[in-house]
């Protein structure tokens, strides 16, 4: 493992910040924040035009929930990076 102390510190900082950011973002998507409506995956006009209102609403709720789950998965990946950075810092401190 050829990660020096500066790189390990950077990995830890970026992983910790990414974990916090993506966890908050996932919570906002889960709560269906109106400000994040533009960040939902776009549906084609033909798909939307063929749906009635309850189906459209359910499609939007499903898109919010899927983005929330994706954000939480990304937060978990960032947590792995932060833990690796912290373990590397601990190993370098003992050496």
Image (spheres, rainbow, N blue to C red):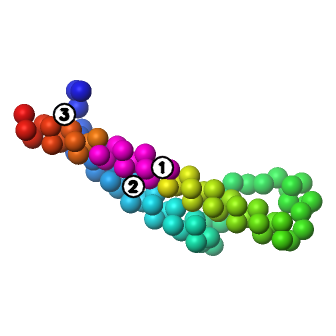
Q: Which residue is mark 2?
A: 19
Taking 66 as reference, is 47 left or right? right
In the figure, is residue 85 to the left or right of 73?
left
Q: Residue at x 32, y 54 (%)?
A: 16
Residue 81 appears left or right of 45: left
Q: Can I make out residue 10 in this image? A: no
Q: Distance from label 3 to label 1 (Cα)?
A: 25 Å
Is 80 contained in the magenta span?
A: yes
Residue at mark 1? 74
Distance from the alpha carbon under mark 1 to that under mark 2:
8 Å
Instruction: Give the residue number, with chain letter if any, for mark 3.
Output: 4
Q: Are marks 1 and 2 in contact (CB under 8 Å)?
A: no
Q: Residue at x 7, y 34 (%)?
A: 95
Q: Residue at x 73, y 64 (%)?
A: 60
Q: Where residue 70 sits in the image (x, y, percent)?
A: 56, 52
Q: Secondary structure at mark 3?
A: loop
Numbered disc 2: secondary structure = helix
| Residue farthest along the right direction in this orientation | 50
Pointers 3 and 1 in contact (C-beta within 8 Å):
no
């Amino acid at each position: 493992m050829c990660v020096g102390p500066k790189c390990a510190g950077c990995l830890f900082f970026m992983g910790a910040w990414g974990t916090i950011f993506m966890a908050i973002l996932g919570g906002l998507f889960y709560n269906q924040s109106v400000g994040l409506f533009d960040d939902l995956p776009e549906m084609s006009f033909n798909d939307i035009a063929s749906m009635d209102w309850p189906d459209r609403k359910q499609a939007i709720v499903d898109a919010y929930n899927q983005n929330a789950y994706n954000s939480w998965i990304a937060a978990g990946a960032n947590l792995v990076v932060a833990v690796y950075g912290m373990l590397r810092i601990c190993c370098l401190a003992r050496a």
